[in-house]
Image (cartoon, rainbow, N blue to C red):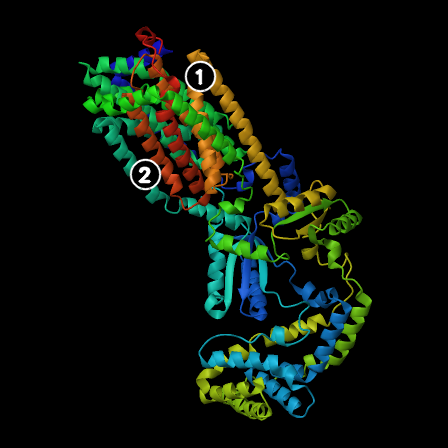
């Protein structure tokens, strides 16, 4: 191998122009072809192998209910329940009219079915109470139905006050509506839009307590060939909201979350600031290179070799893995950070040899003899570290392993061919400092003299680290890798606060309605389950009694709710006259004692004093939504018997799949953010339904898959590196010397994470095999020099090259740490921490482990 490296470097030097010209021409052609086929598949669902049992369950559910795949959840919060409900209906209608952007738009637990039959889902006593309240409010309802304007509202309020004055209704029952009306009028006087909630004030107008949020589910058309496949759809949602005046200033907040939005925001974070981070990283990279090699020609040669390797590495990705995924796209900074080490090692050694050699030919020959084989070993070890990821079921890093592992082989080949040829053509010289630092050699001697104390310190550090590592934990929840300040994450967390809207549910497929019903009963009995929903849940209980109650109310209220004629819209003067008239009765009622009617009278008088200018806002604040709420009441009183067969097809398809399977959805009890609660929920449901799938199961299973994948990768990488080192070094002590500092660095890194509260997650766990490859490379360089009989390793060109390699590698990884994406930042942070400990163990522990170098110059030829 040494002889092969010597001949390869010599050939490249002797035919430098040809090697450079042919290599760069080939790289340019390959780069153009690669650019044409370069794509990115941002579908995070493909990050795990589809053959995994839990993935098969997920895919079966997706096939049965394709409308639930790739959803945006649009969350609407309104100042009043009326606004929330109306805003959701407007958004659903507008987005549904855009089939080119949204394949499916729907409102779960909304629509005419629930408006019409909602009262049947309440307890009979509550249904009776709502019917009684509606009947008692018949005069008010009649007034509003015949005049659904601010004038009609003021007349209805006046009617209430007159009833209290005649003792027909208790005055305290009017406190809430009078306060609400007063607040709406005060807001109009102040120029603010704050509508009155008639849904809350008209008893019985809704099937259930007013919801605090409404959810619209939309399935966008995604373009996975772009970095942010859902951006256009998300931007359209917000654009429509602005067009319809559904904005915070008008009391409505529209946010977008769901799996697609979360993934889109994560990918957006990857892109955001990437250019700036890359520019800063490149500038620092060049700075460290300039300090390391002290030659513009050498810097140019290293960067040219690096860019050529990056292009060829991208070509390998296109050929072997196809499209990049959100994890494998990180190959670029990883390749730069690791591959640049080969160039620095060769150039620093060359500069030291050139300082004492008459010709470039002699310097390159001595350089290849001294550092060639260690580079081969380091490259092979690093490639093994990456390729160990390839056989895993975690497809995201499996692709990364193939790309980066192949890249290491490419980088090694280019550094032994293109780089020497460039050094020859650019006539790069040497410099005195390349030989190393003298005082560092004295530190090396001190470490050897006190090696016993150093080894004791190493044992103590290892023991303490082992104790600390037990506190290290794996964060299984991918939501923790998202930007907590993003809209999608904040909306997601808000959904999780309510057990009825939490997305952390589990779904089970049942072959028939009978099986689904039986499964629902067994799951409902579990203490970890708060409720179970399936098609049968949409069939209310005790329907005959409730229908009779609603039929009686409908007979009494039908003429009231559907008057023969409706008054024309009032003029501004008519509205102001109604305000003055109502204020008079309110003041009379308020004079009898401390009652909100007095405050309302004052507000009405001040509103009337504002003149016609206040009328439009007064009408918006008082009368908006009256017609819609009256229609809600009409529909609620038209309830009809519900059976599974009578459930509308649009609603039925949410619960019966295209393959005939029935979907049974379970909601969890307790805090979904608590890993113990989540685990208990998944375990309990799966004890009844082993094939249950959903976000909680995905979190549990994907975490296990990732941990298992890296256990396999770690064993493969360690075994392969030990075999490689054993074949090359042929000495168990030397193999141990290479691996010892590396294992210690790994322990210190994990202990640091445990103490600092940095958990392992889906992203930063990728760094572990990478650090293994980097550490082996650093240690190999030292051990090779030591075996060659060199004294004072820390003062050698190798030590200088290792230090600057660490600086350049850390700079490349720093671009990840600066990422706006928490997952990439976590990866960069852990790489940085691990790199520091790797460097410390290489420079301070390895010399003590090696001891005095065997003075055997004849072994140089073998190295």
- On the picture, is 763 further left or further right than 161? left
SS at badge 1: helix
Q: Residue furthest top?
A: 858
Towards the viewer: 661 or 690: 690
| Mark 2 secondary-structure assignment | helix
Residue 420 falls in image quadrant: top left
Question: Which quarter of the picture shows residue 862?
Answer: top left
Number of numbered markers = 2
Q: Residue at x 51, y 46 (%)?
A: 480
N-terminal of the pair, mark 2 or mark 1, is 2
Which of the 4 image quarters holds residue 550? Answer: bottom right
Q: CA distance from mark 2 to mark 1?
A: 35 Å
Q: Nearer the viewer, residue 689 or 355?
A: 355
State the residue position of label 2.
Answer: 281
Whether residue 375 is visible to the viewer of this picture, yes or no, is no
Give the quadrant of the N terminus: top left
Q: Which residue does the image show at 41% across and 39% down from the upper left?
A: 829
């Amino acid at each position: 191998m040494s002889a092969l490296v010597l001949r390869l470097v010599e050939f490249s030097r002797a035919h430098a122009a040809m090697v450079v010209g042919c290599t760069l021409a080939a790289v340019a052609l390959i780069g153009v072809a690669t650019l044409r086929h370069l794509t990115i598949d941002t579908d995070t669902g493909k990050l795990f192998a589809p053959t995994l049992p839990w993935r098969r369950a997920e895919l079966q559910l997706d096939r049965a209910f394709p409308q639930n795949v790739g959803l945006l959840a649009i969350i609407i919060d309104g100042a009043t329940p009326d606004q929330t409900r109306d805003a959701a209906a407007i958004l659903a209608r507008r987005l549904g009219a855009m089939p080119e952007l949204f394949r499916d738009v729907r409102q779960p637990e909304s629509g005419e079915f629930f408006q019409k039959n909602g009262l049947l889902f309440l307890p009979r006593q509550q249904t009776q109470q709502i019917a009684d309240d509606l009947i008692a409010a018949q005069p008010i309802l009649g007034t509003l139905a015949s005049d659904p304007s601010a004038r009609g509202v003021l007349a209805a309020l006046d009617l209430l006050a007159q009833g209290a004055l005649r003792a027909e209704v208790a005055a305290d029952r009017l406190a809430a509506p009078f306060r609400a009306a007063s607040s709406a009028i005060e807001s109009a006087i102040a120029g603010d839009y704050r509508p009155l909630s008639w849904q809350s004030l008209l008893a019985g107008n809704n099937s259930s307590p007013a919801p605090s949020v409404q959810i619209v589910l939309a399935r966008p058309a995604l373009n996975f060939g772009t970095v942010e496949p859902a951006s256009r759809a998300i931007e359209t949602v917000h654009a429509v909201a602005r067009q319809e005046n559904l904005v915070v200033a008008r009391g409505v907040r529209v946010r977008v979350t769901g799996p697609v939005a979360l993934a889109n925001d994560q990918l957006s974070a990857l892109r955001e600031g990437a250019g700036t981070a890359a520019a800063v990283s490149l500038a620092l990279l060049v700075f460290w290179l300039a300090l390391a090699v002290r030659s513009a020609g050498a810097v140019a040669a290293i960067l040219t070799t690096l860019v050529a390797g990056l292009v060829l590495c991208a070509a390998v990705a296109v050929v072997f893995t196809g499209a990049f995924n959100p994890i494998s796209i990180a190959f670029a900074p990883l390749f730069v950070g690791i591959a640049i080490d080969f160039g620095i090692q060769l150039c620093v050694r060359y500069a030291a040899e050139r300082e004492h050699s008459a010709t470039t030919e002699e310097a390159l020959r001595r350089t290849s003899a001294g550092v060639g084989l260690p580079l081969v070993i380091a490259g092979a070890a690093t490639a093994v570290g990456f390729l160990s990821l390839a056989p895993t079921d975690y497809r995201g890093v499996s692709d990364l392993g193939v790309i980066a592992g192949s890249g290491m082989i490419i980088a090694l080949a280019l550094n032994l061919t293109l780089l020497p040829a460039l050094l020859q053509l650019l006539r790069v010289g040497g410099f005195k400092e390349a030989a190393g630092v003298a005082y560092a050699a004295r530190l090396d001697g001190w470490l050897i003299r006190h090696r016993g104390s150093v080894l004791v310190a190493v044992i103590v550090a290892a023991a303490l680290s082992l104790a600390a590592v037990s506190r290290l934990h794996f964060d299984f929840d991918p939501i923790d890798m998202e930007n907590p300040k993003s809209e999608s994450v904040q909306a997601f967390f808000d959904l999780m606060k309510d057990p009825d809207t939490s997305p952390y549910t589990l779904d089970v497929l049942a072959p028939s309605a009978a099986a689904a019903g039986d499964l629902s009963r067994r799951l409902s009995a579990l203490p970890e389950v708060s409720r179970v929903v399936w098609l049968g849940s949409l069939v209310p209980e005790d329907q005959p009694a409730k229908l009779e109650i609603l039929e009686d109310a409908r007979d009494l209220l039908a003429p009231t709710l559907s008057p023969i004629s409706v008054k024309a819209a009032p003029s501004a003067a008519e509205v102001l006259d109604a305000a003055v008239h109502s204020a008079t009765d309110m003041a009379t009622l308020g004079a009898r004692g401390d009652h909100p009617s007095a405050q309302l009278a004052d507000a009405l008088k001040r509103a009337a004093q504002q003149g016609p200018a206040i009328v439009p806002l007064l009408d918006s604040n008082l009368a908006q939504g009256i017609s819609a709420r009256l229609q809600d009441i009409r529909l609620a009183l038209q309830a009809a018997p519900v059976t599974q067969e009578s459930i509308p097809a649009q609603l039925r398809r949410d619960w019966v799949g295209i393959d005939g399977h029935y979907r049974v959805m379970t909601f969890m009890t307790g805090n979904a953010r608590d890993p113990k609660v989540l685990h208990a929920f998944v375990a309990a449901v799966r004890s009844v339904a082993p094939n249950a799938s959903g976000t909680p199961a995905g979190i549990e299973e994907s975490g296990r898959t990732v941990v298992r994948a890296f256990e396999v990768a770690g064993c493969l990488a360690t075994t392969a590196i030990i075999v490689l080192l054993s074949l090359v070094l042929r000495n168990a002590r030397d193999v141990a010397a290479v691996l010892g500092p590396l294992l210690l660095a790994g322990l210190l890194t994990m202990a640091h994470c445990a103490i600092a509260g940095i958990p392992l997650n889906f992203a930063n766990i990728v760094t572990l095999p990478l650090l293994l490859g980097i550490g082996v490379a650093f240690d190999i360089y030292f051990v090779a020099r030591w075996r060659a009989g060199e004294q004072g390793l820390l003062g050698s060109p190798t030590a200088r090259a290792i230090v600057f390699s660490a600086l350049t590698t850390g700079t490349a990884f720093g671009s990840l740490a600066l990422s706006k994406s928490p997952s990439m930042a976590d990866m960069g942070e852990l790489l940085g921490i691990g790199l520091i400990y790797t460097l410390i163990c290489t420079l301070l522990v390895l010399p003590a482990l090696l001891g005095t170098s065997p003075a055997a110059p004849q072994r140089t030829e073998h190295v």
